[in-house]
Image: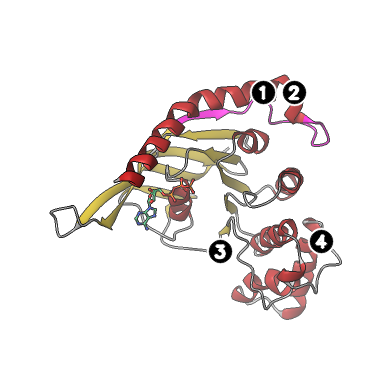
Amino acid sequence: MTDKIQFNHVSKVFTIRDSNERKNGIKEFTAINNVHFSVKVGEFLTLVGPSGCGKSTLLDLLGGLTKPTSGQILIDGKPIKGPGLDRGIVFQQYALFPWKTAMGNIEFGLEAKEIPKKERTEIARHFLALVGLSGFENRYPHELSGGMKQRIAIARSLAYEPDVLLMDEPFAALDAQTRETLQTELLRIWEKTKKTIIFITHGIDEAVYLGERIAVMTSRPGTIKQMIQNPIHSRNLDEDIRSTPGFAQARHQIWDLLREEVHQSQAFERKNETA
Ligand SMILES: Nc1ncnc2c1ncn2[C@@H]1O[C@H](COP(=O)(O)OP(=O)(O)OP(=O)(O)O)[C@@H](O)[C@H]1O
């Protein structure tokens, strides 16, 4: 399989204001350092790491919302120049337009592609059905549950047919039961659509349940500590995979890798709190 995405030794340094610094009150802060990995066409990669290790920065770079300080990110062999309709992004907060209905929200991305109204409606209906929300076409976001809103956000991202779906802790704000249901639905959608997915999470269980491969990140500055081929990924979605010994083993392996990173990240946060 060919590479869809390549991170070639990517680093991102932010400049931040700091009154204790001599250099005009400006300090440099390395958020991610020398990140180097690739993702195959149609692959589902989960990225797990401690708080503040640069997960969202990495996704923002992929989305073209910000640029690397050094290194290069390629999609289909070409450097990313900015945001594009080839990449759909789903954030933790649903980011739906409150004044648009479910259909209106899904159709939004299609308007940018200048797809005629009739076709837009057909496509939106198709993706509403794909996320299990047929019948909710005319509901406004405030009339939907958190899980439903996130399904709409996923449908909206899929509707304009991006090759790549970038997901930044999309289920973090949901209750445990809804989260597990949506995780299974996301896998079904992925099997049907064959999108390349990069999914960021704090949760080890979520990373193991979803990822074909799991990238474990170090604490700040974030880099890839280890890339793990998930031994339990090919399975029947109706099976209770979370209770299998393979799942427990993968979970344990990742926790072993993360433990030290989480402690470092917490120590950094405490130090900054008292500074
Ligand atoms: N625009 C910015 N300017 C300055 N610093 C930034 C900026 N964006 C992020 N950072 C810093 O870079 C580091 C990485 O942030 P990022 O949000 O990518 O981490 P994260 O792993 O997604 O965190 P969390 O798991 O808590 O959501 C943090 O210390 C953050 O404060």
- How far is the residue under mark 1 from the one under mark 2? 7 Å
Question: Sequence-wise, which precedes: disc 1 or disc 3?
Answer: 3
Could you tell me which residue is drawn at 56 percent across and 59 percent down?
86
Residue 45: tell me if it is visible.
yes
- How far is the residue under mark 1 from the one under mark 4? 33 Å
- Residue range in magenta is 225-240
- Are the residues flagged by discs 4 and 3 in contact, CB closer than 8 Å? no
Could you tell me which residue is drawn at 80 percent across and 67 percent down?
125
User: Which residue carries the number 2 mark?
Assistant: 244
Q: Which mark is residue 85?
A: 3
Q: Main secondary structure of the magenta part?
A: loop
- Are the residues flagged by discs 1 and 2 in contact, CB closer than 8 Å? yes
Q: Kindly report which numbered mark, 1 or 4, lies closer to the viewer in this rendering.
A: 1
Question: Sequence-wise, which precedes: disc 1 or disc 4?
Answer: 4
Question: Residue 246 at x, y = what percent?
Answer: 69, 21
- Label 3 CB sits under 8 Å from any ligand 1 atom: no
